[in-house]
Amino acid sequence: MRKSTILLIIAVPLAFGLGLLLRIPSCQEQQRRDGLMEDSAAIKERQWRDEEGRLHTEIKALQAESTRDFLKMKYQDSMLQELQKTVK
């Protein structure tokens, strides 16, 4: 066999393996982010209006593994967004 064929046979699997190794950290990061939402977003809230029409919200549980993780979470609720700004 020629040297170029041998190099090609060796280079292709090495390149493929290197590509897989480079993807592993991004997959692990995605799994960490998914777990972050499951672990830390234990939010139970109750909303009601009083006699004067004011809206009240009671948050039963809000926890995060760390402040940094809490700040990374994306919330649609404006009250939680304001809380994130306060924590910063």
Image: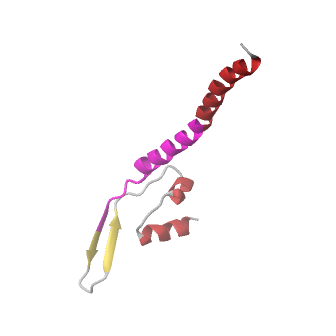
Q: Who's the residue at 41% across and 54% down the image?
A: 41
Q: Can you give x and y, in whole percent of width and height, for residue 3 in the image?
A: 76, 17
Over which residues does the magenta segment extend?
Answer: 23-46
Q: Nearer the viewer, residue 58 or 12?
A: 12
Residue sitting at the far left = 51
User: In the shown orientation, is residue 30 left or right of residue 51?
Assistant: right
Residue sitting at the far front = 2
Q: Nearer the viewer, residue 66 or 5?
A: 5
User: In the shown orientation, is residue 12 left or right of residue 43?
Assistant: right
| Quadrant of the drawing holding the N terminus | top right
Total numbered labels placed on residues in the image: 0
Q: Who's the residue at 43% across and 72% down the image?
A: 78
User: In the shown orientation, is residue 80 left or right of residue 20?
Assistant: left
In the image, is residue 2 above or below residue 23? above
Q: Nearer the viewer, residue 40 or 72?
A: 72
Query: What color scheme is it?
Result: secondary structure
Residue sitting at the far bottom = 52
For the stretch drawn in magenta, what is the main secondary structure? Answer: helix
